Amino acid sequence: MALKVFNLACERDHAFEGWFTSENDYDSQSERGLLSCPVCESLEIRKTPSAPRLNLGAVEPAVTPANAPVQASMMPTPQQLQAIYLRMARELAANTEDVGERFAEEARRIHYREVPERGIRGVTSSDEAQELLDEGISVLPLPFGPLLKDPLQ
């Protein structure tokens, strides 16, 4: 089955792809409010312009003279930052166990060697997180919690 890939964005301009069986499938899901931004969970989704990708075979890489100026960039573009952000969320989801509301309890059990060491993620209050830090237990608040509850594409 061939899929249509549409470039989509939310009202905060988070760009992402959506894969649909047809234009009608996209329209139907959009009308029923089934589409949401994978970054901020916004339901205000729109299609953005896209160019078709034509794979016409391998192209020889251009040869650059040794003394040619090199393009350099210090800061990634917003699209690159979003890709990094999503890649981090995917890695975190793949390599940690979701312990949910038991986060603080499980972090202490790991720290005090009551259970085997492993990567965990979950939910705790800011007060509880501060108590963990005061005990010498390293914790890191994550800005992409919503991304970790569903499969990431």
Image (tube, grey):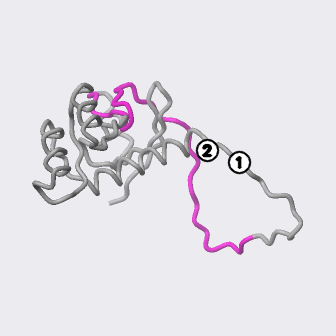
Q: Residue at x 82, y 69 (%)?
A: 64
Tell me which amino acid carries mark 1: Ser
Q: Could you tell whether 105 is left or right of 23 in the image?
A: left
Give the magenta range. Answer: 32-61
Residue farthest left in this picture: 114
- x, y percentage for residue 143? 37, 34
Q: Nearer the viewer, residue 57 or 98?
A: 98
Residue count near mark 1 (Cα–Cα under 10 Å), binned few <14, some 14–19, many ≥20: few
Q: In the image, which disc is placed on residue 107?
A: none
Q: Residue 116's image quarter?
A: bottom left
Q: Which residue is mark 2?
A: 76
Query: What secondary structure is marked by label 1?
Result: loop
Question: Distance of mark 2 from mark 1, alpha carbons?
Answer: 7 Å
Disc 1: which residue: 73
Residue 54 magenta: yes
Residue occupying the point 24% across, 41% down: 149
Q: Is residue 28 visible?
A: no
- Vertical placement of 116 versus 153: above or below? below
Of the pair 107 and 79, the residue shown nearer to us: 107
Is residue 93 rendered to the left or right of residue 58? left
Farthest-out residue, right: 67
Check if mark 2's residue and mark 1's residue have beta carbons within 8 Å: yes
Measuring from the top left, give residue 4's x and y in whole percent. Answer: 41, 50
Specify the quadrant of the image occupied by residue 135: top left
Image quarter of residue 127:
top left
Q: Amino acid at mark 2?
A: Pro
Residue shown at 55% from the left, 46% from the top = 80
Compared to residue 74, the image places residue 32 above or below, namely: above
